[in-house]
Amino acid sequence: MKFKRTQSSIILSFGIIIFIIFGFQYLSFTSSVVVLVLLLTFLTYLFSTFFSISEGRLIKYSFFIKTIEIDINNIKYIEAITVKKAGQIHITIKSDKEDFYYLYLKDNSKIQIDNYYRHSGKSLGRYLSKRFNIKLIEAEKIKYIYGNP
């Protein structure tokens, strides 16, 4: 089962395509080639980074290469973090309210996973919690305008 970036990659790819169309007419040829290579590398990274669950293991791929491999039985609990900014209104429409997840492992290490890795509309952290009966703790962090006290 693959968990890919869905919403964010689509929005970013449209933004990059608009930048390519309108931005290159003002750049010189050499700088436009350099910017094009960088943007294509970024787009390749967006579409080639995903998580996969197979045979009880959680595997992260970057540029289609395994970078992290975790046995799901080694996860103690999952912490769902919602970041709120003081003085701002936060509206959530048809998605989970958390921004990212921390996976706490039995060897006392933690791994951060962003919320936008999804499969069939369900985020990776929520799926792991429900499917493998891993304890899910919801927490809020508040960011202030001039730093945290």
Image (cartoon, rainbow, N blue to C red):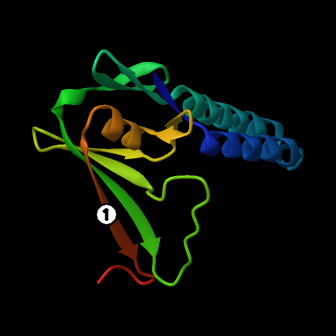
- The residue drawn where x is 57% and y is 62% is 92
Q: Quadrant of residue 121?
A: top right
| Amino acid under disc 1 | Ala
**Residue topped by disc 1:** 139
Say whether residue 98 is left or right of residue 40.
left
Say whether residue 78 is left or right of residue 94.
left
Say whether residue 82 is left or right of residue 22.
left
Extreme residue toward the left, this view: 107
> Above or below — where is 99 with respect to 64?
below
- The residue drawn where x is 72% and y is 35% is 36
Q: Quadrant of residue 56?
A: top left
- Where in the figure is residue 85, as x and y percent of width and height? 47, 75
Q: Quadrant of residue 5?
A: top right
Q: Residues within 10 Å of mark 1 (few under 14, many from 20)?
A: few
- Where in the figure is residue 7, as x and y percent of width and height? 63, 43
Say whether residue 128 is left or right of residue 72.
right
- Where in the figure is residue 108, as x and y percent of width and height? 11, 44
> Above or below — where is 111 with respect to 95?
above
Element type where label 1 sits in the image: strand
- The residue drawn where x is 32% and y is 40% is 129
Q: Quadrant of the N terminus?
A: top left
